[in-house]
Amino acid sequence: MKQNRAVLIAIVLFGSFLFSHGTTYAQFSSNLSSIIDNSRASNAVWSVQVRDSSGVLLEDLNGSYLMRPASNFKLVSSGVFLEKLGPDYRFETTLYGRGKQIENSWVGDLIIKGSGDPTINGLFTRGNALFLFEKWVQVLQERGIRQIDGNLIGFDGVFDDVPYPKGWEWDDLSYYYAPEISALSFNSNVVDLEVTANGRVGTVPEIQWFPFNTPYVEFINEQQITAPGTRFNESYRRELGTNIILLRSTLPQGYYETEPLTVTAPTHYFLDTMFRYFNRRGIDVTGHIFSDNDFYRWSDDGLEILDIHRSEPLHRMVNELNKESNNFIAEMLLKKVGAEEYGVQGTTDLGLQVLKYYMAEMGFDTTNVSLRDASGMAPATLLMTDDLNRFLISVRDKEYYPYFYNSLARSGVSGTLGHRFRNSSVRDNFKGKTGFVSGVRALSGYLDTDSGNQLAVTIITNNYTVQTSHVDFIHQRILEYLQSRY
């Protein structure tokens, strides 16, 4: 009896050892275990779940683990946006006049009320980010207005004035994927820098930037041209709280580089660009620019509507959100969901509250999630792989599912999957969402198998130290196995 008990204890302890080291699990194929265990990333934390189209669990490795999903979290975010706002929702940005027209002058202020539109940029206008200002110039010129004897005032109080979700890392904040959030935003709150290294070795490369080399930002160009054939080393940093941007890259002679870099105070950036554009187009603004964030004191009494700009429908934004993994759209829509749901000033926390309720309705164990943002950029955003994988099944019952499904990138064809799986059998047979932050690589979506089935697949790798390309290769091998096995 003692010997049997000792054997039993040994088995339990050995099982606990295997469990803690992630070597083998029930319902996980030995072939898949071998792919992971024989990789250079075997000591990372791996979590994999696969379900068939009816929701039956086929493969499970660490499905109950809390994982950092990175941008795979946008799958859930896009679901709540489609459900709460609706696929056909459109933002309205209103141009008001306070005063009156006297001959060719508007005597008084122009007031722009933002509603959180994340698409006042070139996304849907063939790259023309200035389209709205062009339209408003035309609106004024058609009325014979050639001068604004007053100020430009931007109302951004539909959202609070907190620029970032909690937990975003400071060294990301200079780059396009981590811009400030404002209810009145232009060009995704970035300037588009171009660097041309056509000079002599050892000299400083030429720079220019959109819009029209605006002095709203100050570039300190300490870059250097290096010998042909040397490597490009990127170094851009905006001093936090300012619009001073340090450029310290080294570029091989003949190299051309573009980089969108963030600005601070986005509402002022919108107004400053509008001010300068108007002057360029022959409408002189004699006053100054101001912003107003007081949600509870806003009133349009005594204001004349000069124009209302309506955005493209929300489902097109979700398409960009998932295909191209657009963090700016995700965080703008999150605040908008909070504002619409509660009828108050939109905040990230309110948006996350709506998102959490949605997740509970969709079967997530919300006692075991940590939410900080809508995009998955924050390291503290955590969920269980099991919940995310089951979501891929449950969302299929929603009326908006066709929009959701069509928003996903196609392997080897489009979006963030366009450069992956091109020489694999998985090419054009997987539609899904990628995810990447430092030490995290994630992949979730729908895999069409050789036998004609469609699987819901979630693969999340945390805490790896090898090159991301190697983790991508392991993800590809897992998908190829699943494609042929099921």
Image: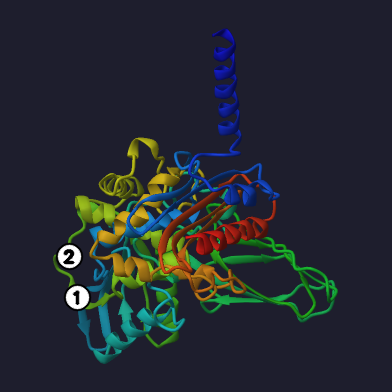
Q: Which of 40 and 483 is in front in this view?
A: 483
Q: How is the image coloured?
A: rainbow
Q: Residue at x 80, y 77 (%)?
A: 253
Q: Nearer the viewer, residue 115 or 286?
A: 115
Can residue 177 be seen here? no
Can residue 87 be seen here? yes
Secondary structure at badge 2 equals: loop
- Please state if 347 lies on the left or on the right of 270 as rendered: left
Secondary structure at badge 1 equals: strand
**Which label belongs to residue 92?**
none
Indicate the quadrant containing the N terminus: top left, top right, bottom left or bottom right. top right
Q: Which of marks 1 and 2 is nearer the N terminus?
A: 2
The quarter holding residue 219 reads bottom right
* Residue 395 pos. (x, y %): 30, 58
The quarter holding residue 156 reads bottom left
- Please state if 136 lies on the left or on the right of 40 as rendered: left
C-alpha separation, residue under disc 1 versus residue under disc 2: 9 Å
**Which label belongs to residue 305?**
1
According to the picture, the residue beneath numbered tag 2 turns out to be: 300
Asked whether the beta carbons under mark 1 and mark 2 sit within 8 Å of each other, the answer is yes
Residue type at numbered disc 1: Ile
Residue type at numbered disc 2: Asp
* Residue 175 pos. (x, y %): 56, 61
Q: Which of 243 and 81 is in front in this view?
A: 81
